[in-house]
Amino acid sequence: MAIQKTYEEINTKIKSGKAVIVTAEEIISIVEEKGIEKATEEIDVVTTGTFGPMCSSGAIINFGHSDPPIRMQKIWLNEVEAYGGLAAVDTYIGATQLSESKGMEYGGAHVIEDLISGKKIRLRAISQGTDCYPRREIETYITKESINQAILFNPRNGYQNYNVAVNTSARKIYTYMGVLLPNLGNATYSTSGQLSPLLNDPEFITIGLGTRIFLGGAQGYIVWEGTQFYPQILKDEGGKTIYKGGTLAVMGDLKEMSTDYIRAAIFKGYGVSLVVGIGIPIPILNSEVMKFVAIKDEDIYTQIIDYSFPHRERPSLGWVNYKQLREGNITIRGGNVPTSSLSSYAKAREIAQKLKEEILKGNFLLQKPIQKFPKESEFKPLLEIH
């Protein structure tokens, strides 16, 4: 008889201290030793993790009202412009926004990291003034203790399976995938492979709207499909199944987060990004879920893309698996190309382990999605209409 478990049953076991939790690394050898069915019977939750640059990130902040009050229309935090088109003292600061005084040396991601770490942030705002909000300018300092809400809200995180980036041109190029050396001098990638959350549940059986996650060192939630959500099931030249295109919109309390799992990053010649740590627990509801979480790096493939092509559609130079990528060298066009990862596998492993420990302590319960994500989605380009 096929094994079927429910969220309620698994949460009951978590509360009683009887749940069996393992990481997405640990489950591989368990399945190899015991098989899918026996592992499904014994294991309740598999934890995943990723820690990499996620540009589509930012924070919603409420400053509280000054006396006299001001309706902030232009806002700067440490000379990084934040969005002033919300309510009087609400703002959204984007991770990639650059400092008006320091340029690429400092940006919105640094403001977020500094806020989490407890540093003082210089707030400057101006307004045209109104009868109910007469003040026209303010300059002061804020901290995470002095403000009301500080909510990390990231519209696109946890990309399911990203490309490998290379450069076939004769010059060095600067990209969001890092510095790419000329003439296939290096290859960069940014996915945690067998630990990656959306590669352990590639068809979104357990991950959806309302899923409770580990976000930046605290508990957070998936609040919608991510922008550019475009789940695809592809086949490589050898017929291997490749999943890509899923993304997540996530939210959590910035005040509870840690700079161990949220860090600013500078990409030379490109700009600023926020490195975000995300861990998602996968409840083992049945053997189908178990088959997915038992995936190994050598069975997960991604595409090698030439970033020297200055167009939306860039040439593919073939496919490679994550075992090959993590060995430090891959073969492209008959040549040896060194690889490096923009995401940290060590931190992804740490996040999966920390999430496992929190569940074992009973501090982290599973949340059943209140709505599943669409199986298909259209990905539209920006057309220039005149």
Image (cartoon, rainbow, N blue to C red):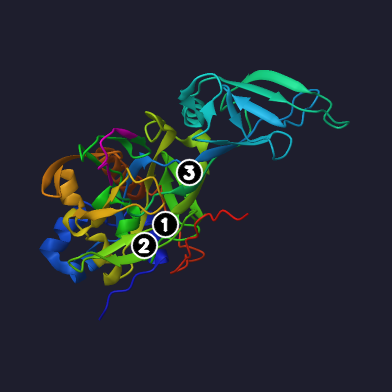
Asked if residue 286 is positioned above or below residue 281 in the image, the reply reads below
Q: Nearer the viewer, mark 1 or mark 3?
A: 3
Q: Quadrant of residue 295 in the image?
A: bottom left
Give coordinates of residue 91: x percent, y percent.
64, 36
Give me the disc on residue 366: 1
Left or right side of 281 for 99: right
> Of callouts 1 and 3, which one flags the residue occurring earlier in the amino acid sequence?
3
Q: Nearer the viewer, mark 2 or mark 3?
A: 3
Q: Residues within 10 Å of mark 2 (few under 14, many from 20)?
A: many
> Of callouts 2 and 3, which one flags the residue occurring earlier in the amino acid sequence?
2
Q: Nearer the viewer, mark 2 or mark 1?
A: 1
Q: What amino acid is found at the position of numbered circle 1 in the picture?
A: Leu
Q: CA distance from mark 2 to mark 3?
A: 33 Å
Q: CA distance from mark 1 to mark 3?
A: 26 Å
Q: Quadrant of the N terminus?
A: bottom left
Report the magenta residues as a range: 165-173
Q: What amino acid is found at the position of numbered circle 2 in the picture?
A: Ile
Q: Residue at x 44, y 69 (%)?
A: 376
Q: Which residue is mark 2?
A: 10
Q: Secondary structure at mark 1?
A: loop
Q: Residues within 10 Å of mark 1 (few under 14, many from 20)?
A: some
- Nearest the viewer among 13 and 144 is 144
Q: Which residue is mark 3?
A: 56
Left or right side of 182 for 364: right
> Of callouts 2 and 1, which one flags the residue occurring earlier in the amino acid sequence?
2
Give coordinates of residue 64: x percent, y percent.
70, 30
Residue positioned most to the right: 131
What number of labels is visible?
A: 3
- The main secondary structure of the magenta stretch is loop
Q: Is residue 328 visible?
A: no
Give coordinates of residue 239: x percent, y percent.
20, 69
